Each structure stands twice: as C-alpha cells, then as structure tokens.
Image (cartoon, rainbow, N blue to C red):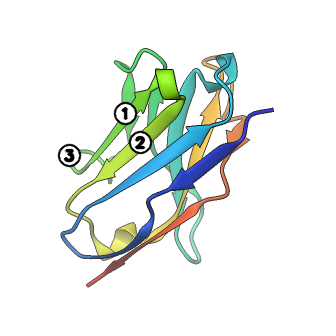
C-alpha cells in the first residue's frame, strides 16, 4: 500500500506562484509514474501533469503548459508541481497520484487546496 501526502497549497494572488509537493510512503513500481489532478468546485476532476520515474517523460494538460512544471526526486520518493502565473481558474483541490507505468492511477493523496484570488 502506498500513501501519498501533499503539501504546499494555500492562498495566492493572481500572477503568483506556488510549489506543491507530494511524498510517497514507499518506493515501488507502483510509483513508476506520478502526477497531479485537480478538482474545482462544481467541476469534474481533471488531469494536470504527470512524470515517469526517469524524469524525462512529462505530460501536461493544455491549461498547465508553459506555466506549470512537474518534477520528481526518486531518492526521496517525492514529486513536485511548480505553478507559476497562477490564475483564479486554477483554484481547486490538487491531488497527487501514482501508479505503475502500465495501468491507471492506483493511489491518490487526500488533496491540498489551492486558492488564487483575483
């Protein structure tokens, strides 16, 4: 069983930055890929970004491209999401996710709130 714990959420003004972090309790094939989803009030949960263990394969939602950067530290079993030029529409609960390369997102964190004020 893998536990994911997010940190780094908070309140920021539009145009500001936040860095989310996610710590995995163990390092296994189950965390070969890590990523972030988000869910805004009244909206469906949506994919934000993901990264494979090697760190070279990254994927972003169109809304995140050019503003967000995902990275990981395999030695510490952590993943990070650097969010710049934040917009009010980025306001959501952000969830860290992890899973094996072949398969879905098996593990989900509890979520961290990001609020961007205009």
Does the rendering let one see residue 61? Answer: no
Contact flag, marks 1 and 3 (Cβ < 8 Å): no
Determine which residue is flagged by label 3: 66
SS state under label 2:
strand
Residues under numbered marks 2 and 1 in contact, where contact means CB atoms less than 8 Å apart: yes
Above/below status of 115 relative to 33 = below
Q: Is residue 8 left or right of residue 65?
A: right
Q: Position of residue 69 (x, y in %)?
A: 30, 41
Q: Quadrant of residue 117?
A: bottom left
Residue 95 drawn at (x, y percent): 57, 53
Q: Quick check: 38 left or right of 87?
A: right
Q: Secondary structure at mark 1?
A: strand
The local crowd at label 1, few if under 14, some if 14 to 19, many if 20 or more residues have their Cα within 10 Å, is: many
Q: Residues within 10 Å of mark 3 (few under 14, many from 20)?
A: few
The quadrant holding residue 87 is bottom left
How far apart are the alpha carbons under marks 2 and 3? 16 Å
Which quadrant, please, contains the C terminus?
A: bottom left
| Residue nearer the viewer, 44 or 35 | 35
Residue 70's spot in the image, x, y percent? 36, 38
Q: Nearer the viewer's eye, disc 2 or disc 3? A: 2
Residue that badge 1 annotates: 71
Instruction: Find residue 73 and report its horizontal and vertical position in percent.
Output: 43, 27
Q: Nearer the viewer, mark 1 or mark 3?
A: 1
**Residue under circle 2?**
80
Residue at the image point whose x is 42% and y is 53% from the top: 20
- N-terminal of the pair, mark 2 or mark 1, is 1
Relative vertical location of residue 38 with respect to residue 118 in this rendering, above or below: above
Residue farthest toward the right in the current orientation of the protein: 1
Figure check: 11 above or below 59: below
Apparent side of residue 10 relative to residue 41 in the rendered image (left or right): left
């Amino acid at each position: 069983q893998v536990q994911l714990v997010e940190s780094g959420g908070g309140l920021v003004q539009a145009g500001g930055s936040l860095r989310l972090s996610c710590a995995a309790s163990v390092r296994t094939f189950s965390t070969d890929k890590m990523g972030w989803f988000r869910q805004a009030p009244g909206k469906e949960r949506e994919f934000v970004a993901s990264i494979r263990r090697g760190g070279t394969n990254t994927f972003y939602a169109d809304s995140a491209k050019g503003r967000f950067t995902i990275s990981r530290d395999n030695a510490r079993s952590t993943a990070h999401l650097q969010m710049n030029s934040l917009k009010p529409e980025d306001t959501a609960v952000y969830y860290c996710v992890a899973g094996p390369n072949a398969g879905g997102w098996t593990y989900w964190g509890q979520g961290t709130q990001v609020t961007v004020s205009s």
